[in-house]
Image (cartoon, rainbow, N blue to C red):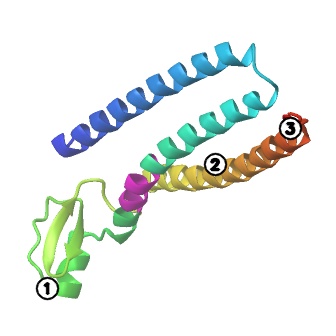
Amino acid sequence: MDAELLFLIVCGAVIVAIALTHWVRVLVAEARASRKAVGWMRNRTRLRCLSVLQIMLAMLLFPIAFFVGNWSAAQTPSEVREKLGITVPERWRAVLTSGRTPIEWPYGTIRDNPAGFAFWAGLLVIILVVLLLSAIYAGRLRALDSGERSAEPSDPPDT
């Protein structure tokens, strides 16, 4: 495994661990407060959970999107030699080109590893769908939250 990829995985795991720790603290505090609070507080807790989920998924979305995009642009060394006339070592599994600069792509082309590409592309689609559905659900919770607040009687004015 590449040292850079391992570094990115470790950094991502640390960020997710920090986010989850904060999320658990917020949930515990909200659970303690909701015992004494009114019903709309539960919707607020759900909204916070959804916000944390959306932030974590968005942080995963961009690296995975670039990864899938690069993988779909990868070519075999022979294709690069034929099309661009660039000298590429034969031992490279796949090549990305930035202008006329060859960059080694260690994961091969889509034809070399279709299952791996399908996994990452499927994960990208799943993240996009979950983000969309969670945004719709958050909108419904906000509507419920504002509806319940407006239905509560207001304090009578002081006379």
The residue tagged 3 is: 157
Viewer-side residue, 92 vs 147: 147
Q: Residue 30: where, in percent of width, then height?
A: 64, 21
The residue tagged 1 is: 85
Q: Nearer the viewer, mark 1 or mark 3?
A: 3
Q: CA distance from mark 2 to mark 3?
A: 45 Å
Viewer-side residue, 19 vs 114: 19
Residue count near mark 2 (Cα–Cα under 10 Å), binned few <14, some 14–19, many ≥20: some
Q: Is residue 156 left or right of residue 71?
A: right
**Residue 67 in sight from this viewpoint:** yes
- First in residue order: circle 2 vs circle 1: 1
**Quick check: marks 2 and 3 in contact, CB under 8 Å?**
no
Q: Mark 2 belongs to which amino acid?
A: Val
**Residue 113 in sight from this viewpoint:** no
The residue tagged 2 is: 130
- The residue located at (42%, 53%) in the rendering is 64
Q: As displayed, is residue 89 above or below residue 86? A: above
